[in-house]
Amino acid sequence: MSDVRHVHVLVLPDRDSAEEVAGELADRFGVTEEPQLVRDALAGEDDAEDAQWLVVVEDAAERLDPAALDEFAAEYEGWLEKP
């Protein structure tokens, strides 16, 4: 058995988008683990307006399609971070 954690990181432009995406992952992709929301401040910026939000999705079974996740994030002006 491998210790490697399989995760997908969706990058969104703001917190509202990240929360919507996190909420829809279960309905759209059958994600059962609660996604983790992480504020990602751009280098040198303290202002929340200059922060991207990350939605971290555990995928231990490697059953999520990266292309579908990327398209889903694009609906919210985001993208799937490439590993």
Image (cartoon, rainbow, N blue to C red):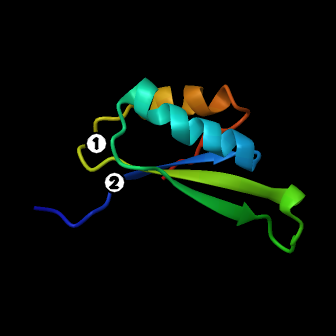
Question: Vertical placement of 15 versus 23: above or below?
Answer: below
Near-viewer residue (4 or 20): 20
Seen at 76% across and 47% down, the residue is 14
Near-viewer residue (34 or 46): 34
- Image location of residue 7, percent across then percent down: 40, 53
- Image location of residue 61, percent across then percent down: 23, 44
Near-viewer residue (67 or 35): 35
How many numbered tags mark residues here?
2
Quadrant assignment, res 22: top right
Badge 1 density bin: few <14, some 14–19, many ≥20, Cα 10 Å: few
Q: Amino acid at mark 1?
A: Glu
- Whether tag 1 and tag 2 are in contact, CB under 8 A, the answer is yes
Badge 2 density bin: few <14, some 14–19, many ≥20, Cα 10 Å: few
Residue under label 2, please give it: 6
Residue farthest left in this picture:
1
Could you tell whether 10 is left or right of 76 in the image? Answer: left
Seen at 68% across and 38% down, the residue is 78
In the picture, the disc for residue 62 is 1
> Which comes before the other along the chain, label 1 or label 2?
2
- Image location of residue 45, percent across then percent down: 87, 70
